Image (tube, rainbow, N blue to C red):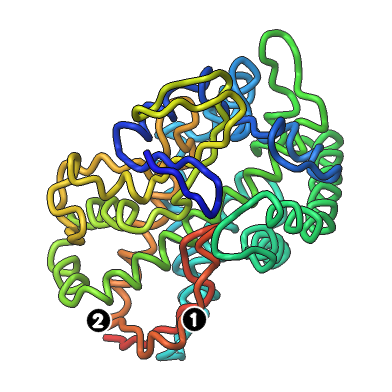
Amino acid sequence: MTYDEGQEQWRVVDHQGVATVLADPATYSSDLTPIAPTQEDFETFRQGNFVGMDPPEHRKLRTLVSQAFTPRVVHGLEPRIEAVCAGLLDGVADRDRFDLVDTLAYPLPIIVIAELLGVPADDHRLFQEWASTLFGGDQLGDSLDMADLERALEAIAPTVREMNGYVLDHIRHRRAHPGDDLTSRLLSAEVDGTRLADEEIVGFVALLLVAGHITTTALLGSAVVTFDRHPGTLAALRDDPGRLPSAVEEVLRWLPPFPELGRRTTRPVVLGGHEIPADTLLMVHLGAANRDPSRFADPDVFDVARSPNPHLTFGHGIHFCFGAPLARLEARIALHMLMERFPTLAIPSYDDITYQNPAVIVGVRHLPIAVTRP
């Protein structure tokens, strides 16, 4: 537990402390609205954003979406993910250099989540633009404060308005022409005898559409950069592809896409020996927790065979990322196909990599790579 004087924020950095905070939503709320700036265009989005909800409201939406992301359902997507991967890589079949993000890391998860929602996958460039605006952090400094956040909300409000309008049109279309997609199921689903209002579904679908791909995009880019920075890693994984799942977990530990989460104290608490008042913003640092030497042997060593690997990248408790199985599957399939297709894969120049703003998300925006073919 540390106090950042510059940001005037408490930070929880140890593995046990982070897990404790995330496991207790009654004391450490995900609803930051009482202490955060607001913007009217975000209100519709917020109604369906269960990431920022506490029980009992959280349970209603989480129950609905978890039914669409069961291990059985996700496993059934494997052939489609493979086909999308193959099609995207076929698009650069005549090139020995291409941008991995533009070619694969962005479009793959967007296309998959769009198809799940029954949204036209042909619009994936539009969704990519939204995500770039929402997660680009161009209006922010290297660390968030409330003034930064207020400026950012105003700057991205037009994008949120456009996204809400698009999703509302999609919902109305699905009401008139229901299908077998997740949006249609949300429209007909009941929890405790009530159906979701359109406003709840708008925020819900928008959250899934944007947040449902950005983690995989970051994970794929970070994996290729990290493997390249640790010579011999790709060769070892080619020799033993069965190690790929543990390698993906180590990338998640090493570079969590969202290294910090905010929580609001609902009452005065004592944490790490410090007295914290009610309505205080706590930043729980997943990145630091993932390198806590009390939980990880040689935490600053990248080890693709690390086991156990109790990283907290996907969260902990009721807000554990429901999309984690899908992100893991997409990453494993994409990385395996890259290794299969290209006997060598390297980053010609680190100077050509463009990174995201780490205050928002850890990942790359552009990743030029050089490959050879059999």
Could you tell me which residue is drawn at 36 percent across and 31 percent down? 19
Q: Dot 2: what SS?
A: loop
Name the side, left or right, on which 24 lies relative to 252.
Answer: right
Task: Give the residue pinned by disc 2.
Answer: 343
The residue tagged 1 is 99
Q: Which dot, 2 or 1, sits closer to the camera?
A: 1
Q: What's the residue type where badge 2 is placed? A: Pro
- Residue 350 is left or right of residue 343, and the answer is right
Task: Identify the secondary structure beneath mark 1.
Answer: strand
Residue 180 visible from this viewpoint:
no
> The N terminus appears in which quarter of the rendering?
top left
Sequence order check, earlier mark of 2 and 1 = 1
Above or below residue 48? Residue 361 is below
Type of the residue with mark 1: Asp
How far apart are the alpha carbons under marks 2 and 1?
17 Å
Q: At which x and y percent is residue 87?
A: 50, 70
Q: Residue 55, how many percent across, how many down?
A: 59, 18
